[in-house]
Amino acid sequence: MIFVTGGAGFIGSNFILDWLAQAAAEPVLNIDKLTYAGNPYNLEAVAGDARYAFVQADICDETAIATLLSRYRPRAIVHLAAESHVDRSIHSPDEFIRTNVNGTFNLLNRALHYWSTLPGPEQADFRFLHVSTDEVYGSLEPQSPPFSEDAPYTPNSLYSASKAASDHLVRAYHQTYGLPTLTTNCSNNYGPYHFPEKLIPLVIANALAGNPLPIYGDGMQIRDWLYVTDHCTALRTILAHGATGETYNIGGGNEQTNLHVVHTLCDILDELAARAQGSYRDLITFVKDRPGHDRRYAIDSGKLERTLGWQPAESFQSGIRKTVQWYLANGEWVRQVRSGAYLNWLRQQYGDHPPGALI
Ligand code: NAD
Ligand code: DAU
């Protein structure tokens, strides 16, 4: 089997659903602490699948992680668990250091102990796939080429600094102990199950509720958007064929200003769910900028494309339309997540055992 940490979050849920959709997929154990961002209900579709199991645990918990490793003997760990929201890292960085740095350290440390006891062939097959971000490279000037794997680390937020630290730990475990690691640095994802504190789902949810659409600063910051299932495909490819000790950048080749993204969302909503009067664009409100706000990110995925043959399947136009359609069809998910009501619902429906929970 494989372990997935943070599997109840946005990318983790999509990764597990995508993984189990492959007929020959190995079973998955989803290890998630269930912070505010973790919703095991995202995985209800696979709750009855014998290949899926869930355990609520903190990646910082040495005993829990050591016990799970020796009991289930995974072939790989796909490490997604993290505190992931830049704005939250500005207000309360502690949890980012604890989970992203100390949690990754604990996971690496426990994985090394486990890996070193494996017989030769299992040791050779084992992989630790660390999922990281393009934000570790800092901010690009308008004319600079996109970030390659050789770009220097210059993180500017507490979030990106904590992710950079975790990337360095992963590198050191490979260089020093030979742990077979893989690191990925991906650009901004979007798609189903995206927590509505991040730009795209926040704008869709606010627009449908008739609330202001907050744009930080002048809205001309640039992000490189990748549809989440394309990220999942890249992770599967790298896990299967990536060279250990290597880093792979993953991006969508879709550089857009925030204002353009928000205009696009408003235009699709005007077409699919028109307001009684006016356009959703009327709700756009410029607000105070994010401190230390990175101006531009862009990723060069050339290495992944050339060496492992990966290509994104979705364009920005197709992916953003699918995303709006998903949120229109899943208004109840947004309402439950925003109000926290899903926590009550889960308890009522499953008691202490969320979908797939190991008892
Ligand atoms: P998310 O915030 O939606 O989900 C994070 C998950 O981790 C949640 O389910 C949460 O409960 C869990 N978690 C948090 N702390 C934990 C702990 N101490 N122990 C166990 N579980 C814990 O995040 P996401 O957007 O799905 O991102 C997943 C990973 O991908 C992160 O490592 C992030 O840095 C990276 N990443 C995200 C993006 C993006 O655009 N969202 C892009 C590139 C890389
Ligand atoms: O680049 C990858 C990163 O992308 C991931 O590592 C992070 O986990 C993920 O959260 C994301 O970080 P960003 O800060 O780029 O995403 P966010 O959705 O928070 O913001 C996208 C852009 O939109 C950013 O320039 C800030 C801006 N913004 C965001 C919000 C929430 C607004 O203008 N208004 C908003 O209300």
Image (cartoon, grey):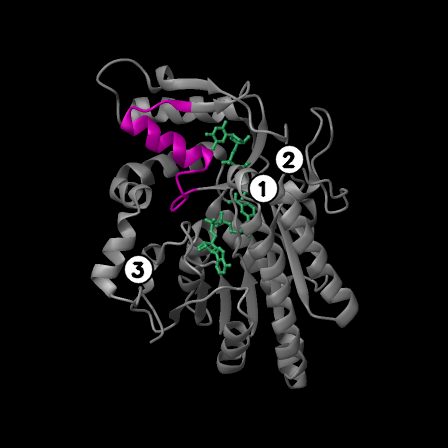
> What range is drawn magenta here?
191-213
What residue type is disc 3 on?
Ala
Q: Is residue 67 left or right of residue 17?
A: right
Marking on residue 213: none
Residue at point 36% right, 18% down? 283
- Is residue 134 visible to the viewer in this orientation of the structure? no
Q: Is residue 291 left or right of residue 355?
A: right
What residue type is disc 1 on?
Ser
Residue at point 37% right, 23% down? 266
Instruction: Give the x, y percent position of residue 241.
Output: 63, 63
What residue type is disc 2 on?
Ala
Tell whether position 52 is magenta: no
**Residue, far bottom:** 119
Residue at point 62% right, 69% down? 127
Marking on residue 298: 2
Cβ of mark 1 under 8 A from ligand 2: yes
Instruction: Give the x, y percent position of residue 280.
Output: 34, 20
The mark that comes first in sequence, 2 or 3, is: 3
Q: In terms of depth relative to the viewer, which is nearer, 64 or 169?
A: 64
Q: Is residue 359 left or right of residue 345?
A: right
Cα distance, mark 3 to mark 1?
27 Å
Marking on residue 187: 1
What secondary structure is found at the residue carrying circle 2? loop
What secondary structure is found at the residue carrying circle 1? loop
The reply to whether the C-beta atoms of the residues labelled 2 and 1 are less than 8 Å apart is yes
Viewport quadrant of the C terminus? bottom left
Cα distance, mark 2 to mark 1?
7 Å
- Is residue 61 visible to the viewer in this orientation of the structure? yes
Instruction: Give the x, y percent position of residue 175.
Output: 78, 65
The mark that comes first in sequence, 2 or 1, is: 1
Q: Residue at label 3? A: 45
